Image (tube, rainbow, N blue to C red):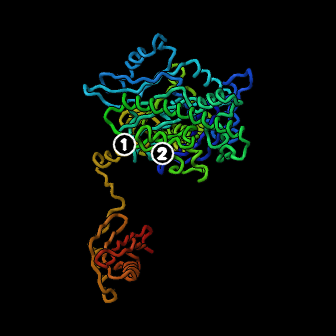
Amino acid sequence: MARAVGLDVGAHHVRVVEADGGPRGLKVVRLGEREVVVPEGGSREDAVREAVDALFRDTRAARDEVLLTWPAESCVLREVQVPFREPDQIRKVFRFEFESHLHGRDIDDYVVDFVPTGDTRDGGARLFCAGAEKAPLRERLGSLERIKVDPVGVDLDATCLLAGLSVAGVLAGNPNLVVVDAGSRSTRILVVVDGRLRSARAFRSGVDTMDLAIEADTGGAPGTGADRVLPGPRPDDLVALPGAGAPPGDLPAAETSAAALEVAVAEDRRGDYLGRLSRELTRTLAQSAGAVTFPLLLLTGRGARIPGVREELGSRLGLEVRALDLFSKVASPVPPEMMEEANATYAVALGAAARALGASPAPLDLRRDDLAYARRFDQVKGGLAVALGLLLLGTGFLLWRAKKEKEVAQVEFDTMVARVRDTADSVEKTFRTDLKLSEEEFAKKYRISGDRLRTVPDYARRVGQMHDYLRNEMGLSTEVPPIRSSLEVLRQVHAALTSVREQLAYCLANTGNFTQRGLDLSLVLSAPEHVDIVKNALEGIREKEGDRKVFAEVVPGTVKQDRNGKYPVTFECLYPRDGGK
């Protein structure tokens, strides 16, 4: 089963989700988050690297097959059109189309990718394009490489969120919807039409904007603004659930007035944020959705946990607003009481893991050009080295075994050739002597090739030539000893079978083949025990004169019942070689 890790680097936290992907869908194995603490005068990139390293150690997540999310608000997002639809043709020209949207910046300083979002009426395609500056992306990748985290791909946090919707089955049940990810420092808007990405926007305004405005208006300490917006303290991890908080009601009159003023300021700043969010949503839908109606808006991120935000957004936009629910639809170790917080904080990381497993309707990859992932071989080179080593070891063993078998076969072949030549020399010497031929005359008349590999065929051919000469030229009989009268033997066999006929329920003689060695007699019997009766009768045949046996030995063949229920058997009746005594 494939396994991948989604790494989401946010404004205040880094989060990982490790998931397995298989035929039955996606399953979350582990997840966790770690706060990014930037010391005074320190580097944020160093703080991110330390937080990621600590998070991977704490969760024991795998550091290979990691997909990194990149903030959409730091990218240039544009919708362009091209006059054709073939992906290869689009990739050749979309950089030139996108360059006009960079406003004086060099396209070579950006890594760009696209996702087709629909077709135009003139046979072209609409594209959602994203461009990220190479310098900060290269710095992030180099920083992560120092802790042995080399992402196989980099995708936008917005499109990773779309992958999470796909793997949870949300797109299948709601093909037309709007998704808002209200984060700490930025807000992302996704417009989905017919289950496909139509448009995506991101702007730098989030819950922190309200926090800072409330702190400035009330003169509070940094971080107190969040207490007026969220229903409790800012969560550090899944263990710390925010509680329901409200201004105390039993304070003195002056303190109660101050507290009421702070609540009013918080409500006013929250209204400003929601008003801007509503305006951005209205403008985005007017520009990209056209006449499409959206019955549902899904809300996630830290802003989704602001009390009353769904109701107020719904009344402003005339849409049903729900909190995004992913983890209740995906197998995960998150307990039920933590689902709301997990959906608000881990939706992007979950989508990144799903995107790494190939479950994304709109995949982008910002690891291109000189930032392309080129170290996949390093992850498998250890296994490949072991496999190649075993392969070489096995090949060496097979070669050694083949060499030994060749040496043994060579010895056996040499022995056979020597025996053939010794036998042939004795026969040929007698043949030459009888015909009064010299060795030169014999070698000239009965030539051989001299090739050791053809020793047996050469001598077999020479024996055949000598045999033909004896038979054709000398007129000598080659049948030694001469075949005895088969008629007499057949008569005796018939008499023997007749003598035991009363003991056989059924006996049919099929064929009788006579050779110099004897007689092959094929019978069909009705029972396997009748074989011994016939054998004894045949072995008891005597010649007319003397006490010599006609057959020295009678050997019955295999006895097996045929489809008619009978038992055909062949008896090999061998003539005696020593006179039959």
Residue nearest the observer in this picture, 49 or 457: 49
Q: Earlier in the sequence, mark 1 or mark 2?
A: 2
Residue nearest the observer in this picture, 96 or 382: 96
Q: Is residue 527 left or right of residue 149?
A: left
The residue under the point 49% across, 29% down is 276
Q: Is residue 174 left or right of residue 214?
A: left
Q: Position of residue 498 (x, y in %)?
A: 29, 84
Q: Quadrant of the C terminus?
A: bottom left
| Foreground tag (1 vs 2) | 2
Q: Position of residue 172 (x, y in %)?
A: 40, 46
Q: Identify whether 302 is placed above or below 139.
A: below
Tell me the residue that label 2 is attached to.
322
Q: Residue furthest front?
A: 253
Residue nearest the observer in this picture, 579 or 227: 227
The residue under the point 29% across, 70% down is 512
Q: Is residue 466 left or right of residue 356?
A: left
Q: Is residue 444 left or right of residue 277?
A: left
Mark 1 residue type: Arg
* Circle number at residue 461: 1
Q: Quarter of the image holding residue 459?
A: top left
The residue under the point 31% across, 79% down is 565
Secondary structure of the residue carrying numbered label 2: strand
* Circle number at residue 441: none
Q: Residue furthest top?
A: 104
Secondary structure of the residue carrying numbered label 1: helix
Q: Quarter of the image holding residue 86?
A: top left
Residue nearest the observer in this picture, 473 or 43: 43
Q: Identify whether 454 is placed above or below 547.
A: above
Q: Quarter of the image holding residue 404?
A: top right
Q: Identify whether 117 is placed above or below 428.
A: above
Mark 2 residue type: Arg
Q: Position of residue 433 (x, y in %)?
A: 42, 43
